[in-house]
Amino acid sequence: RLISKTRYWMEDGYLTILHLGRLDGFLGFQSLKFIFEKIFPEMNERLLSKIKFKIVGLDNESEKSLYIKKIASKYDNIDFTNYLQNIEPIYAKSDIQIIAPKLATGGRTRIIESLAYGIPVLCSNESADGLNGLVHSENILLASTKQDFIKNLELIFDSPHILESLSQNGR
């Protein structure tokens, strides 16, 4: 079901980034590891402080889950939520979903679901591979390097109206 309420992007000046998937699953682990080890350390501290990062997914306290929580602990703006049956309220409060692995496995379903809910997506080129009709900066934000991810996040902060455009065009 599509989220039909009027969107207020970046409420209170914060960018709420959503990441879906179990912490120790192949896609989730690779994506979160890349975000916390490669993207966040390179980001401007002022912008990083304006991000609310919501991670929703099964946390079974495995070695990989604990590792993700350890590397995320450097940041005060991370919120872990275990598996939820209904994630619609999470989508309604999110500005963008990020999918950052360098492999295509499993990301396409998350992309399609986010776009159907009207939530813009920032993902690796590989994650979107095989999804026809996606055009960078028109209905999705694509990145092939950590610098590309950072530039896209900076673009959102500089031009938050792009979120509405991506949301409308992505549906």
Image (tube, rainbow, N blue to C red):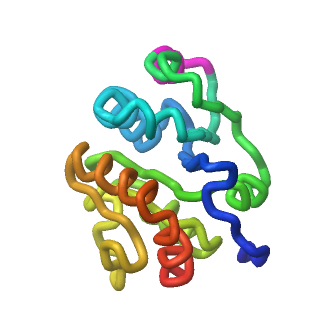
Total labels drawn = 0
Q: Does residue 68 show up magenta in the picture?
A: yes
Is 40 situated above or below 16? Answer: above
Residue 20 part of the magenta-drawn span:
no
Asked if residue 141 is positioned above or below residue 17 in the image, the reply reads below
Q: Evaluate whether residue 107 shows in this view.
A: no
Query: In the image, 169: left or right of 14?
Result: left
Q: Quadrant of residue 123?
A: bottom left
* Residue 3 visible in image: yes
Residue at position x 49%, y 30% in the image: 24
Q: Quadrant of residue 43?
A: top left
Q: Residue at x 50, y 78 (%)?
A: 165
**Where residue 136 sits in the image (x, y, percent)?**
31, 73
Q: Is residue 115 left or right of residue 159?
A: right
Counting from the top left corner in percent of width and height, residue 170 is at 49, 79
Q: Quadrant of the C terminus?
A: bottom right
Residue drawn at point x = 38 percent, y = 79 percent: 138
Q: Which residues are magenta?
A: 61-70
Q: Residue at x 52, y 55 (%)?
A: 97
Tell me residue 9's x, y (percent).
63, 62
Q: Position of residue 156 (x, y in %)?
A: 44, 59
